[in-house]
Image: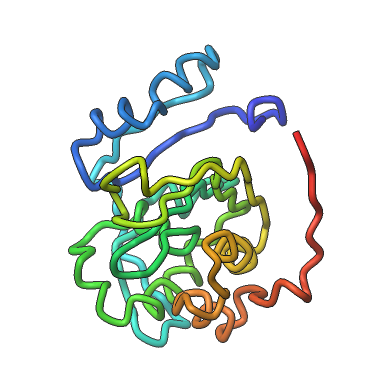
């Protein structure tokens, strides 16, 4: 769709937890991009030299952190998380997925994680957040333990408001948006809406 909209180049990248080539292959991303057959589409392996120490002026907790340059400088940055359980943050959604474009010792962020993710959201500003809830992981996340933990819901959430996207996706897990500390912190910083009753939600069936 980005190519159809006239993009000159589409770079797909993620700072994976495990070996990057294996992750791109096992996830199906490599095959999916190859099937597009467009030279403008590039699968990028993270280059650690491209992390830029970034001041976070409005931060309440995380004052500076290395962030991937391409995520900061892209004309249009699209964040595409898979909705899943996470042992520390409760869920991985859009705000948590920003950890895929940061460097440093990421484990250090797990202390006061919700506020740290909200602080990152003041500088990592996706043009669009698309939450893939085709199949959601209900337990043993983030990497999963069994197919018994997976529920098929065939749903996508797309929003220019990353907080709203996370809030709505949280409800698929039979949880309220306020259970995610990152959603609460980001909303408190004025980064988006977290009350589904005040959102303009448009349903589309494909």
Residue 197: give x, y in percent of width and height. Answer: 77, 75
184 vs 191, nearest the viewer: 184
Residue 205: quarter of image: top right
Please tell me which residue is depicted at 24% across the width and 35% down the height of the picture. Answer: 20
Query: Which residue corresponds to the image point at 56% horizontal and 55% vertical from the top-left?
Result: 126
In front of the other: 189 or 23: 23
In front: 14, or 63? 14
- Where in the figure is residue 175, as x and y percent of width and height? 53, 71
Residue at point 25%, 79% (across, down): 111
Q: Is residue 153 above or below residue 96?
A: above
Give the percent coordinates (x, y) of residue 186.
Answer: 53, 77
Q: Nearer the viewer, residue 186 or 43?
A: 186
State which quarter of the image contains the C terminus. top right
Image quadrant where one finds the N terminus: top right
Residue 178 at x, y = what percent?
54, 80
- Toward which corner of the image does residue 62 lie, by quadrant? bottom left
Counting labels gives: 0
The structure residue drawn at horizontal position 63% and vertical position 64%, both measured from the top left corner, is 168
Horizontally, residue 123 falls left or right of residue 192, namely left
Give the colour scheme of this rendering: rainbow
- Residue 86 vs 63, above or below: the answer is above
Q: Looking at this view, name the residue that lies furthest to the front.
A: 148
Q: Is residue 61 above or below residue 71?
A: below
Q: Is residue 82 left or right of residue 202?
A: left
């Amino acid at each position: 769709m980005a190519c159809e909209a006239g993009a000159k180049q589409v770079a797909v990248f993620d700072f994976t937890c495990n070996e990057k080539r294996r992750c791109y292959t096992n996830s199906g991303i490599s095959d999916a991009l190859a099937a597009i057959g467009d030279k403008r589409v590039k699968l990028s392996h993270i280059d650690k030299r491209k992390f830029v120490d970034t001041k976070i002026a409005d931060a309440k907790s995380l004052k500076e952190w290395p962030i991937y340059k391409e995520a900061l400088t892209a004309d249009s940055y699209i964040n595409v998380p898979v909705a899943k359980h996470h042992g520390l943050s409760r869920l991985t959604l859009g705000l948590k997925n920003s950890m895929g474009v940061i460097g440093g010792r990421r484990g250090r962020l797990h202390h006061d994680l919700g506020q740290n993710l909200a602080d990152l959201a003041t500088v990592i500003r996706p043009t669009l957040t698309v939450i893939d809830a085709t199949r959601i992981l209900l337990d043993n996340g983030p990497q999963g333990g069994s197919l018994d933990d997976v529920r098929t819901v065939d749903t996508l959430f797309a929003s220019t408001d990353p907080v709203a996207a996370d809030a709505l996706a949280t409800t698929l897990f039979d949880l309220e948006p306020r259970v995610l500390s990152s959603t609460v912190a980001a909303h408190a910083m004025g980064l988006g809406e977290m009350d589904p009753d005040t959102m303009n939600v448009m349903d589309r069936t494909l």
